Image (spheres, coloured by chain):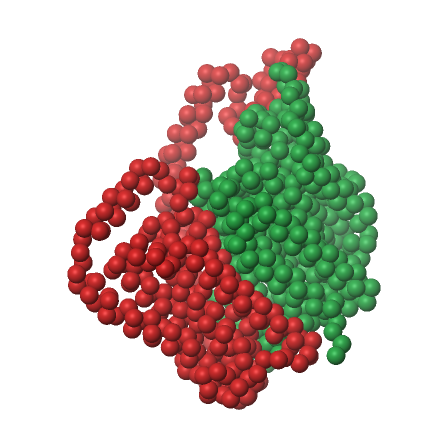
Amino acid sequence: MNNTSQNTNPKENNCTWKRFVAWVNGEEALTLPKHCISEKVEKSEKSKVRKNWEETAELRQKIYRILSIVICLSIIVMLLITVKELPPFGSSTNPASNEVVERYIESGLEETGAVNIVAGMILDYRAFDTFGESAVLFLAVMCVVILMRRDSNNISAEEDQEIAEDEEFEKEDSNIILKQIAAFIVPLIFLFGIYVILNGHLSPGGGFSGGAIVGAGLILYSIAFGHEKVRTFFTFRTFTKISVSCLLTYCAAKGYSFFTGANHLHSIIPKGTPGNILSSGLILPLNICVGMIVACTMYGFYALFTKGDI
Amino acid sequence: MHVNFIHNIPFFSIFLAMFSGIITPFIKNGKYAQRVNSAMILIVGIMSAILFLNVTATGESFTFMMGHFPAPWGNELRAGPFEALMAITFSVVIWLTLAGGRTFIFEDVLSEKQNLFFIVVNLLFASMLALIYTNDVFTGYVFIEINTIASCALVMSKGKGESIVATIHYLIISLLGSGLFLMGLSLLYDITGHLLMPSIQQSIFKLMQTGEYQLPFMVVVGFIVLGLSIKSALFPFHSMLPGAYQAATPSVSGILSGLVLKSYIILLIKIFYCVFSIDIIHSLKVTNVLFIFGVCGMVMGSVYALREVKIKRMLAYSSVAQIGYIFMGLGLGTHVGVIAACFHILAHAVTKAMLFVCTGGLVDVSDKKDQIRNMRGAAHKNLIAGIAFTVGALSMVGVPLFAGFVSKIYFATASLYSPGKMAATLITLAISMILNAMYFIPSVIAIWSLPTEKIERAPVEPWFAFSMICFIVLNFALGIFYKPVIRILELGIGLLS
C-alpha cells in the first residue's frame, strides 16, 4: 500500500500526504507532532512532547489534589445537610416504620419459628439476599486464591527461599507465652463460636458473627503453633470441600424452599416449637452453613495473604 | 397443585448459574469446567427463549415470589418481554464470546487456575441475570457486589503485572460507583421504608404529594444515577476501561465491554421506570444531565480512540463512545429514546464482543503485537477474524444492513420527539459517525493491506470460526430484521412503566 501510493502519486513529497499514509497504516496517531515523518525529527519532537508532558505533570497533580479536596468537601456538606433533613432516628412516625417492619416484629416468631427476629429476616423473609451475600464471600475467597495462591506467575525462586528461611526461623522461636495462652484460649474461642452459630435463631448472633469468631480462633491457632500444624487437619482440599458443600447445601435447601413457597406447594420442613434448639425450620442448618463458610473464608484470607497457600 | 414452570424460569436460571459456579471448584480440569459452563449457559439460553416466546405471546409481565412470603416482606423477581429479551441476548453473547475465545483463555490463564476462572464466569453470569430480573433494589445491590468482584477477578485472571495494575484501577472506580449506589439506597430506604421497586414507587408518589423530604429525595436520585453511571463507564468515569481491556484475555474484554457495562444500564432503566417513574426523572432534569454527558462521551470517546495506536485500547475508547450513545438515548427523556438506547445495548453487545474476540485472533497472527502498525496483513493470515473485524467496524461506523446502523437511525428518529435536543443530537450523531469512521476504517485498511513478506495462513480453529460466523449472522439479523426486535422492546418498556 505504501509503495504503490508513493510510485503513483505525484504528491509523494508532500508532508501531509505522507502523514496521512502513515496514519492509515496505523503507524502514527493524529495528534502527534505536525511535521514530515523523517526519523530524526520525529525522535527529537517526541522527546520534546514527553518533556512538556513531564513539566505539566506536576501542575496537573496539583489541580487533581485541589479538585479532589473540593469534591470531597462538597459531598460531605451535601450529605450533612441531607442527614439534617432525614426523619428523626427511631420515631414511630418514620416512613420506615410501616407494615413491613410491623409484620416482621409481630408475626415473625409465628411465621419463621425463630425467636431471634433478625435471623428470621435474613434467613427466611429475605433469604435470597443472604444467599447472594454468602456467594460474595465465596467469590471473594476464590478471587484471592486466583491472585495469591502460589503459581509460576507470582512467586520466584528467591521469594520461595525467603519464605522457607522465615519458616525455619519461626520453628526455632519457642514463643512460650503465646503457645501456653493460646492452648488455653483457642478451645474456648471455638466453643463460644459454635455456641453463637447454633443459637443463632434463639439469641443475638448467627452464622456470620459465629463464623467470624471460629475463624479468629483458627488464625490464633495458626499464629501460635505454626502453619504446618493447621495443615494436619485443614488443607486446601478440606477448605474447598467445606465451603463448597456448605454453599451447595444452602443452594439446595433454599432452592427447595423458594420453589415450594413460590408455587404454593406444601413444604415438608417442620417449624418445631419456637425456643427449642431444634426449631425454626431451615434457619439452624443455614446458620451452620453460613458459619462454616465465614470461618473458612476468614482463615483462608489470612493463610493466603501470609503464606500464599492454605 | 398446579405449577407454572414458565414463571419459575427466572428463578431457575439464576440458581442454575450460581449452582454451577459453586460446584466448579470440584472440577480440577479447566477443560471440563469450561464444558459445564457452556452447558449451563446453553440451558439458561433455551429456558430464556421459552420464557421469551411465552411472554411475547401473552404480552404480559409477571412477578415471582422468592420464598414463602409475598412482597413487600420477601424478595421478588420480575420478568416480561424486556427482561426475557435481555436474558437471551446475554446468554447468546456470553456463550459465543467464551466459545470463540476458548483457546485464548486456555493460553492466558495458568492451567491450575482455569477452573477458578470458570467459577468466576458462572457467578458473573448469575449476577447479570439477577440484575436483569430483580424487582428489589437491595437484591440489585447484592448482585452488583458479585458483579464487581467477578469482573475484577476476570481482569486479573491473566496474572501478569500489567493486569494486576489494571485490576486495581478497575476495582477503585467500580467500588466508588457501588458505594455511591449503596448510600443512595440507604437514604431511599430511610425516606420511603421499602426496598421493593413498586412499593418504593407508591411511597415516592405519596412523598411528592405531601412535599416531604424533597432534598433527601434529590440526593438519592443523584447518588443512584451517579453510582450506576460510574459503574457503566459514562464519559468522565471511563478511565479504567482501556487498561483493563488491554490487559485482559480477549473473551473477558468482550464480556466486560459488551455485557457487564450493559447490565448496570438495564438496572438503571428499571429503576427509572419502576422506582422513580419517568415523569419525576424528567422533572428533576436528570435526563438533561445524562444527555449532556452522553453527548460529550460520544465525541470524546471517539477523539481518544483516534489518538490510540494500540488496537484494544482503541476498541475500549470506542466502547466509551457507544456508552455515550446509550446515555444520550436515555437522556432524550422520551419513550422512543429509551427504546433506541435499548436497541443500541443489543447492537453494541453483539458487535463489541465479536470485535474483541476477533482482535485476539488478529493479534495472535501478528507475533502477539497489538499496535495497529504491526498488524498489517493480519486479515490475510486469519481470514475469518479479518472478515469479522470488518463487519464489526462497519457496524460500529453505522453502515446500512449492519446492526449499528439501525440504532443510529432510531436515535435520529427519537430526537425528533424531543425538540429542544434535536439539533444537538443530530449534529453529534453526524460528528461521531465521522470520527468512528476515521479510526475504524484505517485499521480495517491496515489489516487488509498486503504485507511485504509471504503470507502464512494460520490454521482455522473450528470454535473460533463458528463463533465469528454466528456473530456476523447475528449482526446482519439485527441490522435487517430489526422491526420485530423494536416491537418487543416497545412492548417490554411499555410494561415496565
* Residue A240 visible in rendering: yes
Residue at the location (39% across, 29% down)? A51
Which percent across, then down, holds residue A266?
A: 66, 81
Quadrant of the rendering where the N terminus of chain A is positioned? top right
Residue at the location (37% across, 77% down)? A195
Residue at the far front: name it: A232
Front in this rendered view, residue A67 or B13: B13
Which percent across, then down, holds residue A253?
A: 57, 71
Residue at the location (21% across, 48% down)? A169
Q: Colour of chain A?
A: red
- Eyeballing the image, is A66 above or below A20? below
- Eyeballing the image, is B333 above or below A126? above
Q: Quadrant of residue B107?
A: top right
Residue at the location (55% across, 57% down)? B23
Which percent across, then down, holds residue A248?
A: 54, 64
Quadrant of the rendering where the C terminus of chain A is positioned? bottom left
Front in this rendered view, residue B71 or B443: B71
Front in this rendered view, residue A86 or A122: A122
Q: Quadrant of residue B98?
A: top right
* Residue B270 visible in rendering: no
Which percent across, then down, holds residue B497?
A: 71, 68
Q: Which chain is green?
A: B
